[in-house]
Structure formats: C-alpha cells, structure tokens
Image: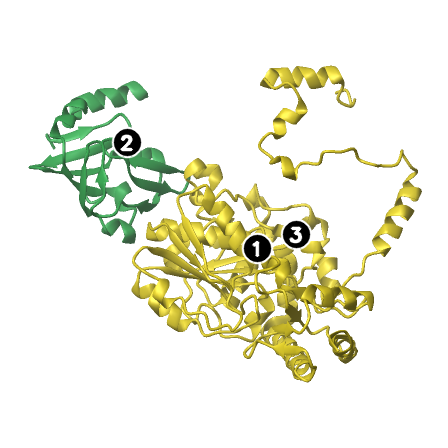
Chain colours: A green, B yellow
Amino acid sequence: MADRKYTEDHEWVEVDGENGVIGISDYAQEQLGDVVFVELPSVGKVLDQRDEAAVVESVKAAAEVYTPVSGEVIEVNEELNNDPSLVNTDAFGEGWFAKLKLTDPTELEDLMDEGAYKTFLAGLS
Amino acid sequence: MRYLPLTDTDRSAMLSEIGVSSVDDLFVDVPLAARFDGTFDLPDHMAEFAVEGRMARMAGRNTTTGDVPSFLGAGVYRHHIPASVDHLIQRGEFLTSYTPYQPEITQGTLQAVYEFQTMVALITGMDVANASMYDGATSCAEAVLMARRITRRNRALISGNVHPHYSSVSETQAKYVDIDIEVCPPDLGGTEDLTSKVDDETACVVVQNPDVFGHVRDLSPLAAICHEKGALLIVVVTEAVSLGALQSPGEMGADIVVAEGQSIGNPQGFGGPHVGLFATRDKYVRQMPGRLCGETVDADGKRGWVLTLSTREQHIRREKATSNICTNAGLCALAFTIHLSLLGEDGFRDLAMLNHAHASRLVDRLGTIDGVEVLSEAFFNEVALRLSKPADDVVNQLADHNVLAGVPAARLFGAGKGLDDILLVATSELTTTEDMDALVSGLSEVLA
C-alpha cells in the first residue's frame, strides 16, 4: 500500500523490488462504468513513461491507459481477458493490468503518493 | 434565412477568411492531369420536360445488360432481382433511415441489420459479420489494416489473381499507414503457389475465390501455412452467389472473409452503390471495422437490438478507432437481406447451381470454337478465355452486333501486360440459350 504511486490520469504503479505492477484507480473504474474489455500490451514490449500501455473499454467509453513509469512488460493480467469486470470489483488488486521491469525508478518521484492522490481527487469534485 | 446564390463578395470573404486567394487554390492537392482545364459546353436553361426528353434520348444510346445478351462480370454481376425487393426497400421506414445514428429507436432497421449479419456469417462460414462496408474493395482494404492490428506485422501479400481494383484500393489505403504490400503477378493457369512467400513477418495473405480468372481452388493448404507462420488468411469473394455452391471460405480456414454483396438483391448500377460484406472469427471481433448490431433483451425481458462494441468506432475512439468507417451501406444491405430471405437456404443453393450449370453449358460450346481456348478448369459462373485476336477488338465488334461479350482482362490489368487476348465471360441464371447462341455465333464469326 505504501509503495503505490499515482498519476493525475488515475493510473497507479505498485513497486516491488525492481518490478512495478500497473493498473487504474478505483476512481477511474467508477468514472468509466462497467468495463467490458481491456486491450493489454504484449509481453516484451518496452514502454517509456506516459506511453500507451493498454486500452480499457466500458459500455460507454474507451480510454487509453498510460504507463506511470518506463519499463519492459514482463507479465500481463490474462485474467482480464476472461473477466474484465475485475477492474471494477478490485481495481487495486485482481484488476491489475501489467507488470513492468522498471528502467528508471527515479520516475517514481514524479508521482503522487496515496495522500497526495486523495487530496488531488478531493480537488476534482 | 436568405436563399440567395453565392455572390462574388461572399466568395472572396470566405476565401480570405481561410487564407487562400482563389477557389482553384483549394484543389492544389489534385494532380494537374486529373483536373479539367476547359470550359463546359452546356446549353442554356431548358424547360423540365425538354431536359427529360433530352436525357432520355441520351440514355437510349446506352446498350444495357438488360436489353441484349450480356456476359459482363469481372466483379459486378447481373442477376434477377424480384420486384418484391424494390417494393420493400422503398417503404419509408427503411428508405429514409439510412445507417442507425440514433440506433435504439430504429428497432426495425437494427433487426434487418442483425439478420443481414447473420446471413453473411452463415454463407461465408464465419462466426461474426458486421453491418456492411461500402463495397468489396473497401472491405478488402479494411481487412488488410485489421490483419496488421491483430498480428502487429506490416507485410501483406496479395495474390495476383485478386481483382486489380481490390489490390489497388488496398494499396491506396496502405500508402498512408505503415504497411508494405506485395501484389503478385497474375497467374492465368490458376496454379499460383504463395506458400513459399509466407514468412514470420507476413501479416496476411489475400486471395480471391473464385479468382479474377474464374478459377475455384481449395484454400485449406494455404490457410494451414498462414496459420503456421502466424499470418491471417483473407479471402475475397467478388461473386457472392458462388457462396451458395462452393465450400465456404470459413470451412477452408479463412480468418477474414470480404466480399462484394451486389450480386444478391442489388443492380449493377454502373458500378455502385454496392455493399461490402465483412466477416471474421469471434476472437477478432474487437479489431473488426464498422458497425455491429447485437441482440439483447430490454428491461422487461423482451427481445431487442442494439449497436454493440461501438467503442471500436470513430465516434468514440476518435483517431484510434479500428476504421474511418462509421456507417454502413444500409439500403443495399437491406436489399441483400430481403432477396436472400426470399430465396431461403435451398433457393440460394439452387440459384448458385443454376448459375454454374449455365456456365458449364456455355463452356462446352465455347470450347468448340476455333480461336477460343477456355483457361478455367474448375469454375463457378465465370471463365477466362484466350482468344486468337485481341479481346478488346473482339468485344467492340460483338458490341456492334448487340452482344456484350465480356470484360477484356486488359481492362482490369492494363494493356500490354500479356493479357490482351484474355476475355472474362460470365453467365448467370438469366443467361438464355438464345444468349449463348448469340455469343457463340458472334465469336465464331469474328475469330474466323
């Protein structure tokens, strides 16, 4: 929990050693509504920070998901192909998108921590 | 609002607003050679009835396929269209509604689209079909783009026996995205082998069946090679009626089937408007272009229809949509649907078999003419002939005798490419014995 960092576009990254798991926030899934499809990146793809990592489709919109940090995709959440609604029911857990091997951990410093993100969300309403 | 024609002042105000000095400046992107540089020799105004009379006289100078024996095909075919088709498509509810932009209030249109998709999926042997594209050629180009998205590869291989208009439209589309297209040379014998050209970088292989020279082939071996290499097999069908007689592209292993649906319910119409069919496998549905109608239930549990998977489309996905197309060929698709439903499954098969029977009879007779060699061994309703004289001349001479003998292959591929003596001849259920007599005697005379 403490290691989870956020972007202003409502993506998150949770760092574990040299790897980071990315996804979208609970606020983002709530705004999108029922998620019906997630287009995941291919394993091995090298992404720069802010590159498009995935596309999430809900019944009313399609949104690009940008990676909060640079890295190589080493694993994707195949479960989302069978059950994309995991993004709605557990955005910070089973609804994760991809695991990246970070190439520049200093980028984490640009991101918001839990407290800053909560303040940011409060400012949106 | 004033209803006045554009004045010179209006015109110059608009031009200066957008920063150009003349109307001609708006057309700088059009190559000079394609621009008309002259004056139109048009008569002064005339009364409405005088214009009607004049246009009717001009139209009367055409030789149309309904008036004389016609063997024209090569991608556009003359078939019988029952009067009921025209009657039904002209009902106001259908005629004016076009593609559903406010979909859920037009349940009748959506149901018709849904039936259309079901029929297209059934006759092509695929899982899912969209609500139609503009025509077969644009369907083909879209299929190539779709294969690139799915495979994330950028090389496309197009058989030399795909209708040149289809390859050409695909090349035009590919020019502005990162796709290398290789169009193979035409293969008159129909034994083209593409298997050695498919490799780990191939996104798709595009083949036509029956091909542009009429050859019918088993595409299963090619499908197997494509799948082994991770490429998609795109099958083009320019004569949709053939699907009533031949093994479906889906059964042969196609990943995407694109077809011209004109043959069913739609007139030749001097080349359009027509209706493009587009079908694929379930697993690729999210990469499919175009509108898609789905069946559902409403809040009261009643059957209803919706447009579905719209998030692929341009009005939602903007520049990242699967395609620029955000519509369908609604009325032509409806005509297709009504005609096919009137035929039914058995009727569709019978129609296809009748087409083939007529072609077989004609081929037997053509084979006896000196100066005619029939090149197609396995065919549906169209064959390629090698003539002892240039096909273009022969066609013109027969036209003078009121017989439309067919389409010279050079019309499609260009003159001087070794195909100048090749003539494509098509039959249909409408071809009579008298029509065949006229062609056989005409050819015998001209080639003697």
Of the 4 image quadrants, the one containing the N terminus of chain B is: top right
Give amino acid for label 1: His
Give amino acid for label 2: Tyr
Q: Chain of mark 2?
A: A
Q: Is residue A16 above or below residue B388?
A: above
Residue B118 as seen in the image, left or right of residue B223:
right
Locate residue B29: give its quadrant: top right
Q: Nearer the viewer, mark 1 or mark 3?
A: 1
Q: Residues within 10 Å of mark 3 (few under 14, many from 20)?
A: some
x then y, percent, for residue A47: 23, 37
Q: Is residue B210 above or below residue B179?
A: below
Residue B37 as seen in the image, left or right of residue B19:
right
Q: Is residue B260 above or below residue A61?
A: below
Report which residue position mark 1 lands on. Answer: B165
SS of the residue under disc 1:
helix
Q: Is residue B260 visible?
A: yes
Q: Is B104 or B334 nearer to us in this picture?
A: B334
Report which residue position mark 2 lands on. Answer: A27
Report which residue position mark 3 lands on. Answer: B273
Q: Give the spatial CA distance, label 3 vs label 2.
A: 48 Å
Q: Is B206 or B286 nearer to us in this picture?
A: B206
Residue B252 image label: none
x then y, percent, for residue B216: 52, 74
Q: Chain of mark 3?
A: B
x then y, percent, for residue B45: 89, 34
State whether discs 3 and 2 lie on one chain. Answer: no
SS of the residue under disc 2:
helix
SS of the residue under disc 3:
loop
Tell me whether the residue at label 3 lies in contact with that at label 2, contact meaning CB atoms closer than 8 angstroms. no
Q: Give the spatial CA distance, label 1 vs label 2.
A: 50 Å
What residue lies at 49% left-to-right and 51% top-to-bottom?
A: B141
